[in-house]
Every structure is written in structure tokens, then in C-alpha cells.
């Protein structure tokens, strides 16, 4: 958000002047995160989740690098190396639990970040690229988390790898070669474990690179805000530092209290007990489930139980599971409402909360056994999920009568300006 009223970085110390001339890193930090970056003055605590996601990534990288120093990517000793970390490495138990619970914390804050974007219309122009890069980050997170789940080489690690990689075999013609190529063989073994370990170590740094692009794309149009009204004057903004650094600092403190409660008092509550049993290819667990943050998509995968014409149920489930995420790429074009914020869209707001409830139901069914009534419930919930994006959102954006918007961000904060501005009509849809 580059405005003429943004405060400029002017170093006073001779060394900082020399540094700014040769390598303007302090200027970059100041203009990106400091007092030189103007931010809408009405951001609420829902905007804390972006900073928390960045902190979680940093936590995962630091703990992951240290854990990699003691981990052995070999099927004969992988499980034992994890136990060695837990029992023999100084503070190894804390590092391992911090990494495992950090993954769950990462997904919690990212899910909150995504649904905040849904509610406040952060995917709308001119921030489409910010949204698209965010979805790419989420896909990379899912791949990284899946590969990390395999590394302890417990029962659920092995069979999770068997089931998830086996999904690619549902693709006609090329599915089986892709499955074999991914594993480096016909079943999870040393080749698969080494590949997953290498990619699990590499992908967080790729995620960090995409996050830099994500922030860069955000700074071009500037941050969205709870009203969805664009910045008009200098009074609509305040410097990011110290106002939002203090606010983010408070949010980080609350987050750490909850995170440390899990880390020190219930570190295994989000894991599966079968993963403390060494992997056994000859003994299938009674109930194979991925980590909890994959449960909604796992429920969609299992919702397809019958073949349709010449299309196998397994293939339809795989397509639906990936489509459940890929549909997010289309949100800037599916939602044609000229109003961003759900605060001023009463009909959209109701369907948004219905989507939240639907996602919770899908998550519950995904973690439950593949039996009735969970299969039927997941089928109904999956049907509503896709109806929400492909039918409800386009129709609501066309027929809804939004509430009048405030004249400016300042007016919404201070209560000034009783003359609201009605939203401009939505642009006509392009001809087919």
C-alpha cells in the first residue's frame, strides 16, 4: 500500500546511511513491517492469524532442522531413532512434541486465516493474487504435513502412506506408474521414506519463499479490512508499527499459552496411539485415519461408495477430494458481489456459518469409522460443500441486497458520517 503520506525511512546514523546506500535491507524492513507501512486503522484480531502462521512456520523450520540431525531415514531404524530423540537427546522430547503439535497449530491458524478471508471477501479484486498464492501455500502445507506424518514409521505412518499414495493408482492409464514412481517401488519402503524425508525437509523453505511472494502481493493493493471499504485518506490508516506489532504481540502471547498447554500437558492428544507401534506391513490397523487436519477432505474422499457408469468410486473420490481445495482458486470469480465484507451481506453471512458447520461435520465424519451413519452424513455434507461454492455463492452474489457501506474506514471507526454509500452495482457477467 504505497501512499504519498507513508512515512519514509531516513537513517540518521552514518553507518545506517552507508548500509542503506549499499544494501537497503533496513529500508525494506521498515517499509514492509515498520512505521513506513500504512495499514487500515480498523483491523480486528482476525488479522492476527497471518502473523501467527508465519510464527508457526518459523517454529516448524527451527525444530525440524534440529530433529533432522538425529533422525535416520531408514525403515530398519526410523522408529527407533524417534524413540532415541524422545529418550536420549537433551530436550529431544520437547523438540519432537513442539514439532508435532506445531503442525496442528499451524493448520489451526491457517484454517482461521482462510475462513477469515471467506468472511471478509479477501479474495476479491484487487487482491486475487494474494488469495491464489495463499491457496498454493496451503497445498504445499498439506504435502509437507503428509510426508512428515510418514517419518516416525509407526503403524499409522506406514498405512497412511499406503492409502494416500494408493489414491494415485485410481487415475486411468497412468495411475499405477505414478504410484510406483512416488514410492520408488510397489509398497512403502526405504525409497519412499528417503524421498519423503528429503521433500519434508525441503518444502518448508519453498513455503517460506511463496510466503514472501504472498506478502509482496499483499503490499501492492494493501490489506483488506472488516468493512471492505478501500483506503481513501491518510486518516484511514495508521503505521503498522507500533500499533499492530503490539496487537500481534498480544495475539502471539495468547497463542503461546494455548500451544504450551498442549505441548506440556497433553502432547499426544492430537496424535494417534497406533503410531507408537512400529510399522508392520502384515498387520492392517482396524481404522486407518490421517492427521485430524485432513479429516474433512478424507470424509469427502470416502463419501463416494458406488461406481457411476464407467467411473470407479475411488476415482470420483480422489477427484472430489482435490476439487474441494482447487475450488478455492475460483472464489474471486464465483463471488461477483461488489461488497466484500460479510458484515454487510446478511444472506451471505448465514451461508458462511452454514459452511463452517458443514466443515466441522465433515471433519467429524472423516475421523470416524467408515460405517453408517458416518458415510451417509459425509455424503450429504460433501454435497452441501460443493453446492456452497458452485451454486449458493454465485446465486447469492447475484440476488443479495447488501447493507449500505460506511463512507470511509474512519467513519466506521469513529461513527462519523451518517451518509452511507450504497455499493456500486456488480459488473455484468461476461458473455459465454
Image: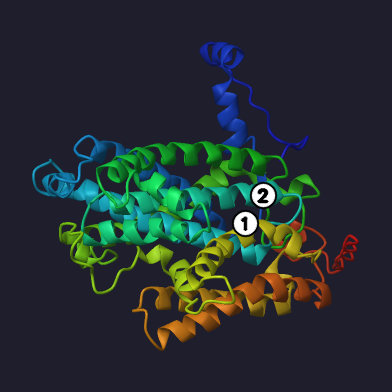
Task: From the top left corner, tell me how far across and down residue 432 is, in percent.
Answer: 88, 62
Is residue 250 among what the camera can see?
no
Relative placement, left or right, of 184 versus 222 is left
Question: Of marks 1 and 2, which one's residue comes earlier in the chain?
Answer: 1
- Residue at screen point 54% across, 61% down: 322
Residue corresponding to mark 1: 43
> Quick check: 116 above or below 252?
below
Task: From the top left corner, tell me how far across and down residue 266 is, in percent.
Answer: 22, 65
* Count of marks, rendered view: 2
Relative placement, left or right, of 183 versus 301 is left
The quarter of the displayed image where residue 295 is located: bottom left
Task: From the top left corner, tell me how far across and down residue 122 is, in percent.
Answer: 67, 57
> Quick check: 39 above or below 5?
below
Q: Nearer the viewer, residue 76 or 50?
A: 76
Relative placement, left or right, of 341 versus 300 is right
The quarter of the displayed image where residue 181 is located: top left
CA distance separating discs 1 and 2: 9 Å
- Residue at screen point 91% across, 61% down: 431
Residue 223 circle label: 2
- Label pair 1/2, CB-CB below 8 angstroms: yes
Identify the image quadrant of the N terminus. top right
- Residue at screen point 87% across, 68% down: 422
Q: Nearer the viewer, residue 134 or 46?
A: 134
Q: Classify 10 Å Cα crowding around label 2: few (below 14), some (14-19), many (20 and above).
A: many
Is residue 146 among what the camera can see?
yes
Secondary-structure class at tag 2: loop
Q: Nearer the viewer, residue 144 or 96?
A: 144
- Outermost residue to the left: 88
Amino acid at each position: 500500500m504505497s501512499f504519498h503520506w507513508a512515512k519514509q525511512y531516513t537513517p540518521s546514523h552514518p553507518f545506517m546511511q552507508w548500509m542503506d546506500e549499499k544494501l537497503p535491507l533496513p529500508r525494506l524492513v521498515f517499509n514492509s513491517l515498520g512505521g513506513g507501512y500504512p495499514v487500515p486503522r480498523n483491523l480486528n484480531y482476525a488479522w492476527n492469524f497471518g502473523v501467527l502462521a508465519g510464527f508457526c512456520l518459523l517454529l516448524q523450520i527451527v525444530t525440524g532442522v534440529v530433529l533432522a540431525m538425529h533422525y535416520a531415514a531408514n525403515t530398519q531404524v526410523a522408529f527407533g531413532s524417534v524413540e532415541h530423540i524422545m529418550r536420549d537427546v537433551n530436550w529431544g522430547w520437547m523438540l519432537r512434541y513442539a514439532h508435532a503439535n506445531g503442525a496442528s497449530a499451524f493448520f489451526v491458524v491457517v484454517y482461521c486465516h482462510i475462513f477469515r478471508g471467506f468472511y471478509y471477501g479477501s479474495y476479491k479484486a484487487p487482491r486475487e493474487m494474494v488469495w491464489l498464492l495463499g491457496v498454493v501455500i496451503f497445498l504445499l502445507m498439506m504435502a509437507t504435513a503428509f510426508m512428515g506424518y510418514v517419518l516416525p514409521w509407526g503403524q499409522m505412518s506406514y498405512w497412511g502412506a499406503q492409502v494416500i499414495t494408493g489414491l494415485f493408482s485410481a487415475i486411468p492409464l497412468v495411475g499405477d506408474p505414478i504410484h510406483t514412481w512416488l514410492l520408488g517401488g510397489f509398497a512403502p519402503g526405504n525409497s519412499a521414506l528417503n524421498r519423503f524425508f528429503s521433500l519434508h525437509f525441503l518444502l518448508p523453505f519453498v513455503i517460506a519463499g511463496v510466503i514472501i511472494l504472498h506478502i509482496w502481493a499483499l503490499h501492492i493493493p494493501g490489506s483488506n479490512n472488516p468493512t471492505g471499504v478501500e483506503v481513501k485518506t491518510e486518516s484511514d490508516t495508521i503505521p503498522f508499527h507500533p500499533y499492530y506489532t503490539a496487537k500481534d504481540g498480544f495475539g502471539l502471547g495468547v497463542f503461546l499459552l494455548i500451544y504450551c498447554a498442549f505441548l506440556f500437558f497433553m502432547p499426544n492428544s492430537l496424535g494417534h496411539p497406533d503410531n507408537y507401534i512400529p510399522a508392520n506391513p502384515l498387520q492392517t490397523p482396524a481404522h486407518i485415519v490421517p492427521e485430524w487436519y485432513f479429516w474433512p477432505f478424507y470424509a469427502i474422499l470416502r463419501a463416494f461408495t458406488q461406481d457411476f457408469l464407467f467411473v470407479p468410486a475411488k476415482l470420483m473420490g480422489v477427484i472430489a477430494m482435490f476439487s474441494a481445495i482447487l475450488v478455492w482458486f475460483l472464489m474471486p470469480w464465483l463471488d461477483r458481489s461488489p461488497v466484500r465484507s460479510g458484515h454487510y451481506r446478511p444472506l451471505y453471512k448465514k451461508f458462511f456459518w452454514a459452511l463452517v458447520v458443514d466443515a466441522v461435520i465433515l471433519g467429524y465424519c472423516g475421523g470416524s469409522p467408515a460405517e453408517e451413519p458416518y458415510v451417509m452424513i459425509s455424503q450429504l455434507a460433501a454435497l452441501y460443500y460443493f453446492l456452497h461454492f458452485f451454486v449458493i455463492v454465485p446465486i447469492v452474489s447475484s440476488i443479495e441486497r447488501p447493507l449500505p457501506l460506511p463512507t470511509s474506514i474512519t467513519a466506521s471507526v469513529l461513527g462519523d458520517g451518517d451518509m452511507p454509500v450504497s455499493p456500486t452495482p456488480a459488473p455484468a457477467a461476461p458473455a459465454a
